[in-house]
Amino acid sequence: MNANKPDYLLEFENLTLGYERHPAVHHLVGGIESGDLLAVVGPNGGGKSTLLRGVMGELRPLGGAIHWRKGRQQLAYLPQRARLDLDFPLRVADFVSLGHWPRCGAFGAIGGSHRSSVSDALQQVGMQGFEQRPLDSLSGGQLQRVLFARLMLEDAPLILLDEPFAAVDEATTADLLQLVHRWQAEGRTVLAVLHDLYQVRQHFPKCLLLARDVLGFGATDQVLTADNLARARRMQAPFDPLAPICELDLPDDQPQRAHK
């Protein structure tokens, strides 16, 4: 075994992800190490959320591969607020208890210890006393705290966050960033899509700058340079269904996924 080889949790081998053969992430090479605190940044339409979908297995590669070096890990995922369906009437405690599903299953009984862990998670995010409140009565910051409480109960070694601090007040953001650092201290790996470059520089030691192509992948201070950020701004473009397809050899049985 090569002593100089990074301790990758997962590795990207010339990975290309996209929709209808149009690449959104193009030829990504590198990896995420166990215990990394990695921010994914770049312009809108640059492939950041697409990369998370690839890691989750929702989107099959157009080319290349994602290799799980220690076997595929259980992961917890926080989607963008716009992708959340909160119309179903749920109380806060019931919603947070859904974090037990990976272990209990959809029809597993929620016992006393599970309910106790729900209360403990809500206390850790500053939402004790809100257990019986309906989700649709919460403010944006309160809802985000509840979402993080549910992530805590999933107890996953890999946590994916898609714009977790968008439209959230400063106090809530500061509290949740403390929780992210605690997860890292516990040995968990956190991959977060972010837009606030100040947050990235202050809290995330590693960074991936995506504008469909990879403009930097490594130490944050080496990735977020003025030149790289200028290149990212120049490369910003919306998804174009008429763009040339990515000329890659695909297996005959690989399905095509529509852009949503």
Image (tube, rainbow, N blue to C red):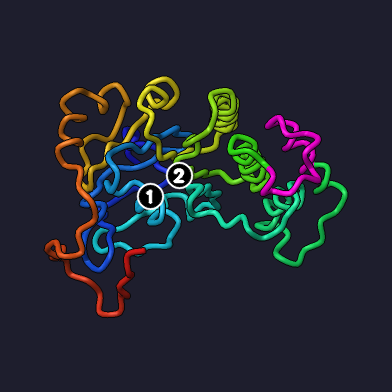
Quadrant in which residue 259 is drawn? bottom left
* Position of 107 relative to 102 (above/below): below
Magenta stretch in the rendered image: 117-137
For disc 2, the neighbor class at 10 Å (few under 14, some 14 to 19, many from 20) is some
Q: How many numbered badges does the structure rendering display? A: 2
Name the one closer to the observer, 160 or 30.
Answer: 160
**Which quadrant does the C terminus fall into?**
bottom left
Residue 89: x and y in percent read: 71, 58
Give the labeled residue for mark 2.
162
Going from the N terminus, do you reach mark 2 or mark 1 first?
Answer: 1
Q: Which element carries disc 2, helix, strand or loop?
A: strand
Name the one closer to the observer, 255 or 135.
Answer: 135
Give the labeled residue for mark 1.
49
Q: Which element carries disc 1, helix, strand or loop?
A: helix
Name the amino acid type tagged 2: Asp
Q: Are marks 2 and 1 in contact (CB under 8 Å)?
A: yes
For disc 1, the neighbor class at 10 Å (few under 14, some 14 to 19, many from 20) is many
**Can residue 185 be seen here?**
no
Name the one closer to the observer, 171 or 212.
Answer: 171
Indicate yes or no whether the magenta region holds residue 131: yes
Q: Residue at x 29, y 38 (%)?
A: 42
The image's mark for residue 1 is none
* Position of 114 relative to 174 (above/below): below
Residue 56: x and y in percent read: 45, 56
Name the amino acid type tagged 1: Ser
Q: Residue at x 40, y 34 (%)?
A: 38
Quadrant in which residue 194 is drawn? top left
* Position of 236 relative to 87 (above/below): above
